[in-house]
Image (tube, helix red, strand yellow):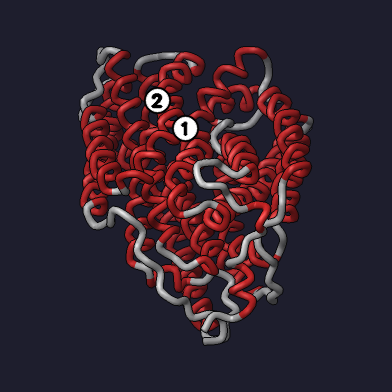
Amino acid sequence: MPSPQLDQLDSPAKSATAVSGRTPVVIRLLVLATFVVILNETIMINAIPRLMDALHITEQTAQWLSTAFMLTMAAVIPITGWFLQRVTTRTAYTTAMGLFLLGTALAAVAPSFGVLLAARIIQASGTAVMMPLLMTTLMQVVPEGDRGRVMGNVTLAISVAPAMGPAVSGVILQFGSWRLLFAVVLPIAGLITWRGLKHLENVGVPQFSTIDWWSVVTAGAGFGGLVYGLSRFESGDVRVAAAIAAAGLVAIAVFVVRQLSLQKRGVPLLDLRTLRYRTYTVALILMSVAFMAMLGSMVLLPLYLQNVRELSALQTGLLVMPGGLAMGLLGPAVGRLFDRFGGRVLVIPGAIGITVALTGLTQVTMTMPFWLILGLHALLMVSLAATFTPVFTLGLGAVPPPLYSHGSSILSTLQQVSAAIGTAFVITVMGARADALRSAGATETLANLGGMRLAFVIGAVLSVAVVITALLLPARADSVGEFEGHGR
């Protein structure tokens, strides 16, 4: 039988429970906050040239501002399953937004690269708490029949925000220095934090538990080391990158063994019993591969547009903006369709659309019309919107309520790892192919174009796995049987 503590976690506060057909205020506030904090994950991409001049650093050093953000997210998110069960909703929100505001303010006035890097790490620590907090709270307060519609709004935060980051930064940088990226975000984030603390209500009852510090260390070293190792592939030092990634995988294996041991005593840092639920596991696989494809294209397309087609950062941002906006605007509509018809009618066409879009991008040339590039990117974003909302809803809906926080933490962690894998994969393939073409006598531009085309081919091949996995998903979440609680 479930323990009383687990029963409490499955009893959200009455005042926070959703009325059917309406999105709870707590979810609206958390979606808005999550959008702002996740936007910052990719907002620095277009600022790298400015940072190199202003801080007198190399491109590889400047890339650390994005790498460190992703690295911190991967290291911190595994701990959030335990943290969210132990504290109230308001405490988790205050912690997340407090860290984000502190990091943003510090970044805006950073006198050196070292301070700016520390500020990005602080920002990422807050972001790492917000993502699982949003997903966990949603599953607790939204009735099952409305989850698709509400999850459509969540898609805006977790999928559109990173896609919009480069476009937003491209616009802001036209009006001033890189510091504006943080100066503009700071008052917006401050207002959102104030409104959240004014209206946010606690959901559920905190559960006291001790923390296993060996699990914390191995989680941070494992997931952080894996992401760092994968990010090093971009530098071209493949042996060192592979060694670091392999060490990260070993630490993850130690972490998993430790969690399986702790589960017998009922005190795991990250409860892996979520993986016993088939639909959740299938959703994790599908989401991971789809994120690889999305992040890979997000890296390749700006490189193609700026390095091969010689567009400015602003022009590049404006060209990819319609796809990001379409993804966000369609999120709620996709959610409503999911509530009415189930997941398969959305996920399968969405997966096919991802494959078609990436296949089209394998044909990029020196003269491909920009309208066609815009259309293919928009198709990719719309297809991802049709895929992510049902997958998140089906996956988390398949686990019992006491495991929501752990399920959302695992899902968020794999997003970061998948992003790192996708980025490392396409950069490595692109670089190797470009080097081979240069050796064969191709010009620099044609060598880069050939490398990008092969990288898009890899993305298209990966997307076939998304289609196959989509066929394994049910139309509705599996009915969750009785969950055996801690100590069993």
Measuring 68% from the left and 43% from the top, which residue is drawn there?
123
Between residues 100 and 297, which one lies in front from this camera angle?
Answer: 100
Measuring 25% from the left and 15% from the top, which residue is drawn there?
368
The correct choice, above or below, for 380 with respect to 275 in the image is above
Q: Is residue 137 visible?
A: yes
Q: Is residue 72 visible?
A: no
Between residues 178 and 358, which one lies in front from this camera angle?
Answer: 358
Residue type for callout 2: Gly
* SS at circle 2: helix
Q: Is residue 439 left or right of residue 53?
A: left
Q: Is residue 377 left or right of residue 441?
A: right
Q: Which residue is mark 1?
A: 163
Residue type for callout 1: Ala
Q: Quadrant of residue 275?
A: bottom left
Q: Position of residue 129 (x, y in %)?
A: 63, 52
Asked if the residue under mark 1 is in contact with the one under mark 2, i.e. CB atoms within 8 Å, the reply is yes
Between residues 280 and 75, which one lies in front from this camera angle?
Answer: 280
Q: Position of residue 82 (x, y in %)?
A: 62, 67
Q: Nearer the viewer, mark 2 or mark 1?
A: 2
Between residues 252 and 345, which one lies in front from this camera angle?
Answer: 345
Q: Is residue 240 left or right of residue 128?
A: left
Measuring 25% from the left and 12% from the top, which residue is drawn there?
367
Q: Which mark is residue 227?
A: none
Q: Position of residue 300 (x, y in %)?
A: 37, 31
Q: Residues within 10 Å of mark 2 (few under 14, many from 20)?
A: many
Q: Earlier in the sequence, mark 2 or mark 1?
A: 1
* SS at circle 1: helix
Q: Which residue is mark 2?
A: 323
Q: Quadrant of residue 175?
A: top right
Q: Position of residue 474 (x, y in %)?
A: 28, 57
Spatial separation of the CA atoms under disc 2 and disc 1:
9 Å
